[in-house]
Amino acid sequence: MLRLYDILRAGRTGVSADLWTSLAARAYFSARFDRTTEADYIYDGNTIVYYIGTSKRPEIPQTLGGVQVLAVERTAFNDTDVEAVKFPDGMEVIE
C-alpha cells in the first residue's frame, strides 16, 4: 500500500510528479464537487474498490456502510469520466 502523499510526491504511478501535483492541486482547490452516496461505490470494508456513480467531480464521503473510508483501489476510477476527486479527511492510502 502506498500513502497518497508518497504517490503524488514520487510519481510512482508512471505519471510525472509535476502532473500529479498539478492534478492534486486542481482537485484540492476546486470549489465544486458533487456529494456522493454509498450507491455510487462498490466498497469492501474501509476501501473503495470501484466508482459506479455518474459525477465527473465526486466527493467521497467520510464513511461508507458505517465505516470510515481509509483507502481507494488504484483502478477505482478507471473507465469513468471523472475529472477530479475530493478525498475525505484521513484517507491516506491508494492500494
Image: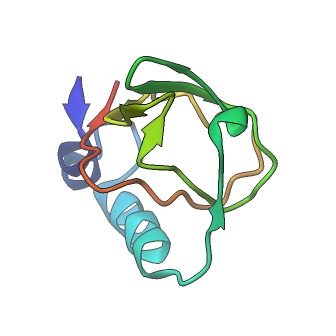
Residue at 22% of width from left, 31% of height from top? 2
- Direction from residue 58 to residue 22 in the image, left or right: left
Point out residue 49 in the picture as x, y percentages from the top left corner.
54, 22
The front one of 95 and 16 is 95
Residue at 27% of width from left, 45% of height from top? 4
Residue positioned most to the right: 54
- Direction from residue 14 to residue 52 in the image, left or right: right
Quadrant location of residue 79? top right
Residue positioned most to the top: 44
Point out residue 94 in the picture as x, y percentages from the top left corner.
34, 33
Residue positioned most to the front: 66
The front one of 70 and 76 is 70
Residue at 41% of width from left, 17% of height from top? 45
Point out residue 38 in the picture as x, y percentages from the top left corner.
63, 36
- Direction from residue 94 to residue 41 in the image, left or right: right
The front one of 23 and 89 is 89
- 32 in relation to 24, above or below: below
- 36 in relation to 45, above or below: below
Q: How is the image coloured?
A: rainbow
Residue at 20% of width from left, 47% of height from top? 10
Q: How many marks?
A: 0
- Direction from residue 53 to residue 66 in the image, left or right: left
Quadrant location of residue 19? bottom left
Point out residue 42 in the picture as x, y percentages from the top left corner.
63, 23
Quadrant (top left, top right, bottom left, bottom right) of the N terminus: top left
Quadrant (top left, top right, bottom left, bottom right) of the C terminus: top left
- 42 in relation to 39, above or below: above
- 19 in relation to 73, above or below: below
